[in-house]
Amino acid sequence: MITTATTAHERMLFAKTAARSVGLLSDAQKAEALRAIASAIVRATPEIVAANAEDLYRGRENGLAEGLLDRLRLDEGRVAALADAVREVAELPDPVGRILDERVLSNGISLTKVSVPFGVVGSIYEARPNVTVDITALALRSGNTVVLRGGSAAERTNAALIRTMRDALAQCGIDPEAIQSVDEFGREGARELMRARGIVDVLVPRGSAGLIETVVTESSVPVIETGAGVVHIVLDATAPLEWATDIVVNAKVQRPSVCNSVETVLVHQDAASRLIPTVVAALQAQGVTVHGDEAVRHLSEDIVPATEEDWSTEYLSLHVSMRVVDDLDDALAHIRRYSTHHTESIITEDAANAERFLAEVDSAVVMANASTRFTDGGEFGFGAEVGISTQKLHARGPMGLGELTSTKWLARGSGQVRA
Amino acid sequence: MITTATTAHERMLFAKTAARSVGLLSDAQKAEALRAIASAIVRATPEIVAANAEDLYRGRENGLAEGLLDRLRLDEGRVAALADAVREVAELPDPVGRILDERVLSNGISLTKVSVPFGVVGSIYEARPNVTVDITALALRSGNTVVLRGGSAAERTNAALIRTMRDALAQCGIDPEAIQSVDEFGREGARELMRARGIVDVLVPRGSAGLIETVVTESSVPVIETGAGVVHIVLDATAPLEWATDIVVNAKVQRPSVCNSVETVLVHQDAASRLIPTVVAALQAQGVTVHGDEAVRHLSEDIVPATEEDWSTEYLSLHVSMRVVDDLDDALAHIRRYSTHHTESIITEDAANAERFLAEVDSAVVMANASTRFTDGGEFGFGAEVGISTQKLHARGPMGLGELTSTKWLARGSGQVRA
């Protein structure tokens, strides 16, 4: 099922037209469409893996780093996992048509605020074919159509996936123009997508801080920013040694490559000699390199001197920075300066300090005595995760399907006029 | 109370710093601050009116149109009305600290989603001094600080109002840097405000479609668009004559200068000869000029021929356009093409058509059998109106104080780590 649209602009218009019928699909129709997509992806495994092999070949020729090649690679097992993820989204409750507010005015007009699809969701992302399938499933489940712009290194894989998904929609009697890609128009396609205000309702960039910054700066379409995490843990004067050690190690080591892993540990000076040697030793035992200020280096061996740059670096790897602070005020000031407003946690037995931290830290998720790794749509019980928003408008923190909907007020009257 | 900040950038940073303490003020403190501002405005009436006289003098010298001069003008009565509006906002419930979601995870972590202030609210608007006071009151009531950029024609009036409000804050022991203006930096100040991503959390433009378009296009700060209203009423085949007449006349005549007044009436062909003569006569009796297509002109006298431009014009005056449509599909197609997605209403006795209209029209407020003039925060029972959002992100339709808040997840644990 190849679209007849020949320009990026025309493709976006097709997605907008398709949004009218997709927005009116029932819960059952949307779930069935996703199950059909999942089955079609499994059936098309040979074709998808073959297209992926071409991308991998080209990637190797172009000297793509091994990490990037690994993210790009699809084998039979990974294709099956893509399909499973779509089936999971199919089972989630319909986020459309929820009644969010109801009131009857004194003149008898009945007002209802309901959740409605955005319409067209755009996404700009890097060469990870799973995002192609992921964002399409989430958008369709919430009654939206999609315009995709993936990394050029995954172009053939994405084309095979999109063809497969469009075919599956058509076989369900759903307009296949609901899934569009502007990949073949290169950078100009991405630029048109960022300027498609009035056609595309919201843009969700996914990828590196650089990509997100570009989209946020250049887009006139409203953006939901899913940003980087320079995540802090504060070890307060009363932090229990066991909690401090377990939480810092978990937050750094359990999955260092993700945005909710910890970057910087701030230790209250009154607890420094009690906590730092044990916490550092536990980190180092797991292969973590600790970048410390002078006070930390005074208390432990094998500490790399921390530079100014360390405090604003999202390592995404087995590195952590550590600093001794004078008090909670000093810790809060450090966080204000360097945090990306994703997640921060304090470890303390002082309830007043915990509550002060929760109230004053201006981040999407603020924790007391828990690992920052819990900032996650799945852990929060949302079923699927659209991303973790670090902006304050529309959605903040882990986003579920509900965050891919807007609202509409319905007013039902019987001839009322305003006095 | 004059700020020591000497550049637009520095002023915005002062507002950001002040947001930390303002965001933690209690309900009572915020209400008291607004009451103090209201009293201070009344006390400063002579000073404010004198500053306004200077702006008016300059405006007349510069050939400002009489309508603009009237919007700019403040006399004793209007200053008192400004203060009254602030007192009304003071009485509204605190939108901060509402618990929006609560859940306890199976591992015992307690999660709470609470409403929090955005931080810094920016506003760019035209020469209407009431916006200066209005937006400041709404922002402070919701725990935010403000950076204002008003029209240069109101510069002295705004300066007097801002000085008065800052003084009042200082006397309440609240950081007066919570109220900032970049007026004296002219267009460059506006540009800096639009680029202050990371300092200013949200921008609310207020004014003409042109001003809003500029802000939406140029701003990297997230914008809440309060847009123009090209508002439609559909008279369906079964529309009762009395409802049709009353609602169209009310929607056009009751206050033609506002965004929820009707621009275009679409009449089902089966009802055209029954409805049009009476509706048109009722409009004309109120001084309305009707711009009609050929079918309308065939049924009534004194109709101005409608041009293509009429269908996309927000008149904001006693003009209305009228067209005969084949059926509901034709009406929906017209609305899709020309609507600004503000408010549309259908007048019908056919329940199925009413529900189809409510479901399919993609506007902030969709009505059946009611006047479009009801799209209003006050009418909806919000107490105050921040504006009427025509965008789909964050807020859609009439916005109350709650729409000037963001959210934050608080997680309270006891040492939990992720498995």
Image (spheres, coloured by chain):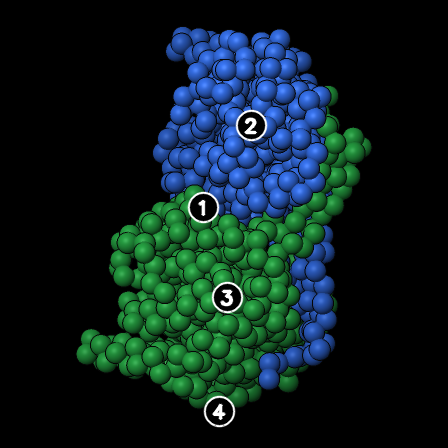
Chain colours: A blue, B green
Q: In this figure, which residue is indicated by the disc labeled 4?
A: B285
Nearer mark to the viewer, of 4 and 2: 2
Q: Quadrant of residue A362?
A: top right
Q: In this figure, which residue is indicated by the disc labeled 1?
A: A221
Q: Where's the C terminus of chain A, which quadrant?
A: bottom right
Taking depth in this image into account, of B418 and B328 the one nearest to the observer is B418
Q: Amino acid at mark 4?
A: Ala
Q: Amino acid at mark 3?
A: Cys
Which circle's residue, 4 or 3, is located before the other in the chain? 3
Nearer mark to the viewer, of 1 and 4: 1
Question: Circle 1 sits in a helix, a strand or a loop, which is it?
Answer: loop
Would residue B70 appear left or right of B256 to someone viewing this image?
A: left
Taking depth in this image into account, of B40 and A143 the one nearest to the observer is B40
Q: What is the number of the mark on residue B172?
A: 3
Q: Which residue extends farthest bottom?
A: B285
Q: In this figure, which residue is indicated by the disc labeled 2?
A: A269
* Mark 3 and mark 1: Cα distance apart in space: 41 Å
The residue under the point 61% across, 26% down is A271
Q: What is the number of the mark on residue B159?
A: none
| Labels 4 and 2 within one chain | no
Nearer mark to the viewer, of 3 and 1: 3
Nearer mark to the viewer, of 4 and 3: 3
Question: Circle 3 sits in a helix, a strand or a loop, which is it?
Answer: loop
* Mark 1 and mark 2: Cα distance apart in space: 47 Å
| Labels 1 and 4 within one chain | no
